[in-house]
Image (cartoon, rainbow, N blue to C red):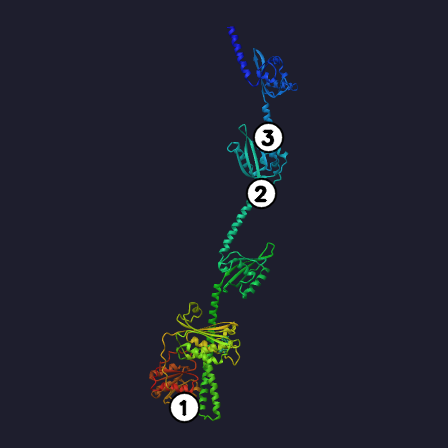
Amino acid sequence: MQARHQEEIAAARSNFELLFDTIDDLLFIVDKEGKVIHTNETTQKRLGYSAEEIHGRHVLDFHPTDQRDEAKANVEAMLAGKGDTCRVPLQTAEGTLIPVETRITAAKLNNQPVLFGISRDISERLLSEQSLTESEQRFRQLTDNLPLPLFEINTEGIVTYGNKKSSEVFGYTPEEFADSFSIFRIAIPEEAQKAQKNMAIMARGERSSNNHEYTAIRKDGTTFPLVLYSSAIITNGRFSGVRGVSVDLTDVKKAEETIRNMAIKERMVREFQTLIDNIPGAVYRINEEGKTTILSMVKEFLADFSKEEFEAGLFESMELIHPEDRRIVEHSNRTIGKTTASATLTYRIVSRGGAFRWVEDRRTPAFSSKGEFSGIDGILFDITRRVKTQEEKDALESRLRNTQRLETIGTLAGGIAHDFNNILTPMLGYAEMGLSSLAEEDPLHDYFNEIIHAAERAKNLVGQVLTFSRAQESQPTTVHIPTIIEEALKLLRPSIPATITIQRDIDAAARNILADPSQIHQVIVNLAANAFQAMEESGGILSIKLHEMVPDRQLRHLLPTLQKVTHIHLSITDTGKGMDEATLERIFEPFFTTKSVNKGTGLGLSVVHGIITSYKGEITVESSQGKGTTFHVYLPVIEDKLVAKPEVEPVQGGNGNILFVDDEQATVTMMKTLIPQLGFTIEPFSSPQKALERYHENPGNIDLLITDLTMPGMTGIELAAETHKLNPDLPVILITGYDKDIELTTPINRYGISRFLKKPVRRSELATTINEVISPHNPTAA
Ligand code: ADP
Ligand code: MG
């Protein structure tokens, strides 16, 4: 049993030793004196001793002499439970050192207290530890010199590492930063909490990193924006702090703001452009050097110009501005910067074809921030339509004014002419009577002739005035104007100088008008005579045109009397000296003339005007000084021809009893002599009432009533109406000095009124008329 037990023990020991020997570490057992009593093979091999050489020696003998005390102390500390390893190296037989980490455990062997020792070779570990330190140094160097602040904090927020930059950017010294510096001090108080919260998130492991913007505060109290990139530091799987890098956002923020401002500016520019594009005008800018820029290009303004041409020509060369308007613009350009006042100019822009547009230029001087004049900002509005409309309106108004003035003058002149006729009637009458009672050899014969001659001229003059005032009776018939033009030119030809050429553009097929041919003749002669006179010195071309036309809306707007029916348009153009505005205003006034006494009476155009308007026509004039004049005459055509009145052979002498009434005593007296000379008897009255009484007494022996039209109490027409009641067959001759008020068709053929006679009545005219009226062969109603 004993032997067996011994055997077992031996087997266990050899097994234990076998195990011992397979271990790489150096194993040894030491007795209580410190003598080695057992080692494994590794120990023997590494130290270079045999088992016998080792066993029995003190364990400290295998340590370098100078470290034996340290080793001893370490071992004692270990045995006292105060340390766990000893780092003193072992020394080989050759004297080299093996770095080891040794653990010692107290145990019992064969009931004897022993120490088990196990030394592990740590040379490799030491090597790697050394390289780790080197890389750490490199890392520190790197981070220290990093141009960004980099720091590490512990879980309390105390800085455990900060590179150079980190203390610098926050205005602290590295020492201050190293001295339990709480990182939360670099956030403004309002944001410290936010920083703590963000750290707590990482501490809880919810995030391993994050980045946030903060407003940092420097030691001196100034602040700046930063972004902090932070990541959790995990040691042995546990959160142990935060590593952070911060980036100063000052520049970034500035850049952001710049970009934002630029965006705002861009938007403003865009909106401004839209705005000016929407303005119904061309916005422009003239800089200090006078260069123009059109900011919004309204197509109408550019017309057929390119933008560059328009800009260069508008204010720089002024080529686009109407020559007559350049002074206004130049003056404004010169003076506008003198005060801050803006200006509104109106001028014309000439387009390529020579046509022009009216523009209104609203301009304001621009000043630099220093208050120096820096150019002009303005808008051009096209106001051509407005100006044209205004011009038309002005023309219409001026025409109306002229018409009214001419009417007033006409009334006045007509009244005077009427009185003149009353005076001329006895003058001519007596002179003719005187002449007829004198022999031709009689020296008084010539005197009377002169009186008649002068009175004749006066009568003619009065006749013209009356024509002008349309107080003239006329005999309208069908008139073919081309024929009359030819006759008139024939008449004028001898007085036309060779330097004047006549051009005709006459539509011979143009229809007729209803008028007094002699009056139309007068119109053409007067207009042509004026034209010749205007070209007398310079020579030139007179052109006469005649065409049919229907007045368009524009013309009817200007000349409202014109109807929308076919008209004859007669125009007489000369290339003479033309007229100025002041002359144009007054040409139709009677006695208005710019000519010397023997050349013009000033009646020509007033007569023309009177004639044209009496036929519901119109006359206009265009003239420019030095270039010439055109008169336009419009007269309505007639479709059907009037039957011409049969000519009546004048009967020389006759007989019959005539009831004569005129409120003018002089005329009555004159007629008392004249009528008997013509072979008739006269019963003269100066009162229509008296005359009517006489007629009532014995209407039978009155063959003819000759009565003045205008009389106090009773007009000639009223008188005729009365006599007509008694005897509808009684013929009546109405004498008028001024028959403006009489509608031509009204009294004629009514109440027996079959003829008008105009004052002053010529002896022969009176004779013929009386004979026509009371001749039994002549129908009283023509
Ligand atoms: P008169 O010819 O006797 O002067 P008018 O009535 O015919 O009188 O003309 C009035 C004025 O009108 C003239 O004196 C002249 O100044 C002006 N006038 C008329 N026709 C023309 C014309 N064709 N060219 C220039 N001036 C004209
Ligand atoms: Mg004239």
* Left or right position of 535 against 677: right
Can residue 370 be seen at all in this image of the molecule? yes
Position of the C terminus, as image quadrant, is bottom left
The label on residue 135 is 3
The label on residue 677 is 1
* Left or right position of 250 against 437: right
Image: 766 above or below 584: below
Provide residue 561's location: percent of width, then percent of height. Answer: 42, 71
Mark 3: amino acid:
Ser
Mark 1: amino acid:
Gln
- Which element is circle 2 on? helix
Which tag is nearer the camera, tag 3 or tag 2? 3
Disc 2 to disc 1, C-alpha distance: 128 Å
Mark 2: amino acid:
Asp
Q: Nearer the viewer, residue 657 or 371?
A: 371
The first of marks 1 and 3 along the sequence is: 3
Which tag is nearer the camera, tag 2 or tag 1? 2
Count of marks, rendered view: 3
